[in-house]
Amino acid sequence: MQRLLSFTLLKGALTMRATLRRSAFTLIELLVVVAIIAILMALLLPAVQKVRAAADKMVCQNNLKQIGIALHNYHESYSKLPTASTPTFGSAFTQLLSFIEQDNIRNKYDLSLSPTTPPNDVLTKLPVKVYLCPSMEPPPAGKGAYTTHYASYAVCIGTVYAWGPANADDGVIVRYQTYPGFKLSDIQDGTSNTILVGEMGFQLKDYLFSSGPYAGQIRGGNTSWAFGYPSYSFGSTLVMMNTKTYAPSLAAGGLTAFRSDHPLGCNFLYGDGSVRFLRDGIEMPIYQALSTRRGGESDLGEW
């Protein structure tokens, strides 16, 4: 009887061990599972990235719409639009702080002083979310102060060379030397056909100098909401948006070109408050016509 019981227990143990061995993964089965997971990730990742890019683009457009509302409210309060710069090197974006619910900065910010003078130097280090596109990568370490007040947007002063004479601006939001602030009624080409603000990403990794002493090197950006300088807070349509290379003679002009981290184009805010995405393939005459206040181009066709 005892032998029979021992045999039964031994048989049960062997059966259980065999069952456990059969339920474990073999190396081949494990490799198959890993391969299936890799294939699923390869199929799903582009779709996830596409959805994320679309969401970022929508947030960016909403930011520009908020800036547009702020510009119209500023116009309602002062009967004019802000200037692209001020005598103390402030920007249009510093003038809009109260109109984008940033009173915590504006109430302490002194527009009669430069952005680098206390107390402004501390205030410009505070983040302003509406001035940042979520698709834009933060500036790399080593860009100094610009890692604190960097931005994604710039006002458009027109078709001019932005480092040239300030009294030549043919856009709507212009330098104070050109005019102390235009009205929306000064836009003769139609507010829906005239750009006020566009994307100007801080820095894109694939923007290179094409020739000269900096050939092949990454072109640094310096977009900032605090400083009323060319390529900092205002740009122009002198150079086509998202141009990837610049010869030394056009390097400064290229720095003031509109650019984004969205594929195939940039978001722009128009005088009527609308936001539209311009594709890279737009014709240069139409692109530049959209940036003037009275160029006489009221019928631009499809773009």
Image (tube, rainbow, N blue to C red):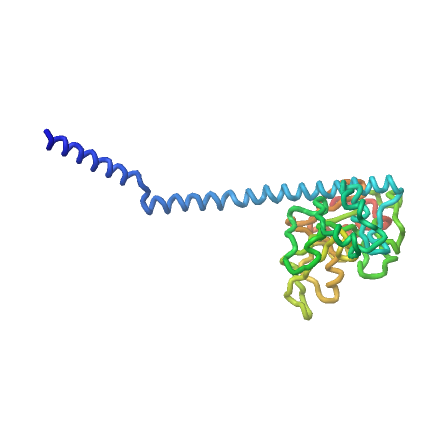
Q: Picture coordinates of residue 29 (x, y %)? A: 34, 44
How many labels were placed on the picture? Answer: 0
Res 186 → quadrant: top right
User: Outermost residue, bottom direction?
Assistant: 213
Query: From the viewer's perspective, is 81 left or right of 303?
Result: right
User: Is the N terminus in the top left, top right, bottom left or bottom right quadrant?
Assistant: top left
Q: Picture coordinates of residue 5 (x, y %)? A: 14, 31
Q: What residue appears at the point 70 percent right and 56 percent down from the top-left corner? A: 146
Q: What residue appears at the point 74 percent right and 52 percent down from the top-left corner? A: 122
Q: Picture coordinates of residue 63 (x, y %)? A: 72, 42
User: Outermost residue, top direction?
Assistant: 1
Is residue 54 placed above or below 239 in the rendered structure? above
The answer to whether one can see residue 116 in this image is yes
Q: Foreground: 277 or 224?
A: 224
Res 20 → quadrant: top left
Q: What residue appears at the point 77 percent right and 52 percent down from the top-left corner? A: 226
Res 87 → quadrant: bottom right
User: Outermost residue, front direction?
Assistant: 118
Query: From the viewer's perspective, is 113 left or right of 59?
Result: right
Q: Foreground: 44 or 103?
A: 103
The answer to whether one can see residue 236 in this image is no
Q: Picture coordinates of residue 37 (x, y %)? A: 44, 44
Q: What residue appears at the point 51 percent right and 42 percent down from the top-left corner? A: 44
